[in-house]
């Protein structure tokens, strides 16, 4: 805030002295890069890096840059991540409540699970917030605890969608052999009902997320379902084909799945 008001002040001064042709002050003098936003990777701020991954300008990245671990950690555990999630959930709720549903049980909302409806933040907080290379053995051990908490903003959205008459489909990259623990975890977290829970079967084990999920959504539409909303934390959740009438991207600067 202070930086912004300084900037406004400087702009006002510059405007009032415009006839004297003052050289505008460079912005970096007005907004020194301190605190979390000041961490740099090769001269690029971690804020810019996060913006780059959220907009899908940066792709196929393996891990969070080590120099951005603190930045991503503060973001994930602080207010901003939650506010960003709320903004997405509120936009989705506003869209959903203005839709006229057919009411034949075929109006569906597709939710991804990890980092969309359930949060693995307790796991990632112990593993560098995505700065450590992904270890499937360790991650699956965490999944089998069944202790992933809900993303509060999206649990609220889920409840709202149910009250509006949507059927819920969970479409996840988790494997079929994790169905039982996933059901337990979803219910424990407050997701008590759904139309379908689609997990990755053995025939999809070598396909990318975007191919697997597009195929599943195609099957849903073939069965007469109308995908009115589709929400996920990965771009591969919402790109591809049969993406639904509208997509919503939940923030996730910790990992990338193609
Ligand atoms: C992944 O974690 C397991 C269990 O802790 C460990 O045995 C294994 O060496 C790790 N793999 C890699 C590539 O670090
Ligand atoms: C997936 O890849 C593995 C290793 O290359 C292979 O053994 C397996 O048969 C493949 N599965 C399918 C369904 O293609
Ligand atoms: C959803 O998209 C389809 C295809 O574009 C369109 O026909 C349909 O009217 C849309 N549904 C709603 C509720 O907007
Ligand atoms: Mg996910």
Image: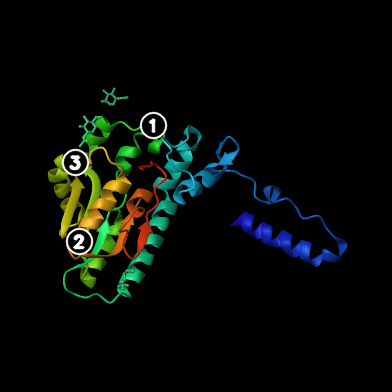
- Asked if residue 113 shows in the view, the reply is no
| Residue 45 x %, y % | 56, 42
Numbered disc 2: secondary structure? helix
Q: Are circles 3 and 2 on residues that touch, CB within 8 Å?
A: no
Q: Which residue is mark 2?
A: 222
User: In the depicted view, which residue is nearer to us: 127 or 255?
Assistant: 255
| Residue 232 x %, y % | 33, 53
The reply, left or right, for residue 170 in relation to residue 231 is left
| Residue 201 x %, y % | 18, 43
Q: Quadrant of residue 97?
A: bottom left
Label 1 crowd (10 A; few <14 / some 14-19 / many >=20): some
| Gap between marks 1 and 2 measured at Cα | 40 Å
Q: Which residue is mark 3?
A: 203
Q: Which residue is mark 1?
A: 132
| Gap between marks 3 and 2 measured at Cα | 19 Å
The reply, left or right, for residue 179 in relation to residue 64 is left
Residue at 24% x, 57% y is 218
Q: Quadrant of ligand 2?
A: top left
| Residue 195 x %, y % | 15, 60
The yes-or-no answer for disc 3 within 8 Å of ligand 2 is: yes
Numbered disc 1: secondary structure? loop
């Amino acid at each position: 805030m202070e930086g912004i008001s300084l900037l406004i002040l400087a702009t006002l001064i510059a405007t009032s002295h415009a006839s004297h042709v003052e050289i505008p002050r460079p912005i970096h003098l007005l907004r020194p890069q301190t605190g979390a936003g000041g961490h740099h990777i090769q001269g690029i701020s971690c804020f810019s890096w996060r913006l780059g991954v959220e907009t899908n300008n940066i792709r196929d990245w393996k891990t969070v840059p080590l120099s951005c671990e603190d930045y991503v950690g503060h973001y994930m555990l602080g207010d901003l991540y939650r506010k960003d999630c709320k903004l997405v959930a509120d936009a989705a709720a506003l869209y959903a409540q203005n839709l006229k549903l057919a009411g034949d049980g075929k109006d569906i909302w597709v939710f991804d699970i990890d980092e969309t409806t359930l949060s693995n933040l307790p796991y990632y907080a112990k593993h560098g917030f995505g700065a450590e290379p992904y270890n499937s053995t360790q991650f699956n051990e965490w999944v089998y605890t069944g202790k992933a908490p809900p993303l509060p903003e999206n649990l609220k959205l889920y409840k709202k969608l149910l009250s509006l008459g949507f059927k819920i489909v969970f479409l996840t990259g988790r494997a079929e052999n994790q169905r039982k623990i996933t059901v337990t975890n979803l219910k424990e977290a407050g997701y008590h009902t759904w139309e379908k829970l689609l997990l990755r079967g053995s025939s999809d084990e070598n396909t990318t997320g975007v191919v697997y999920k597009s195929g599943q959504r195609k099957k849903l539409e073939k069965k007469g379902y109308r995908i009115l909303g589709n929400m996920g934390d990965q771009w591969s959740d919402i790109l591809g084909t049969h993406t639904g009438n509208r997509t919503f991207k939940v923030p996730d600067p910790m990992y990338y799945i193609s």
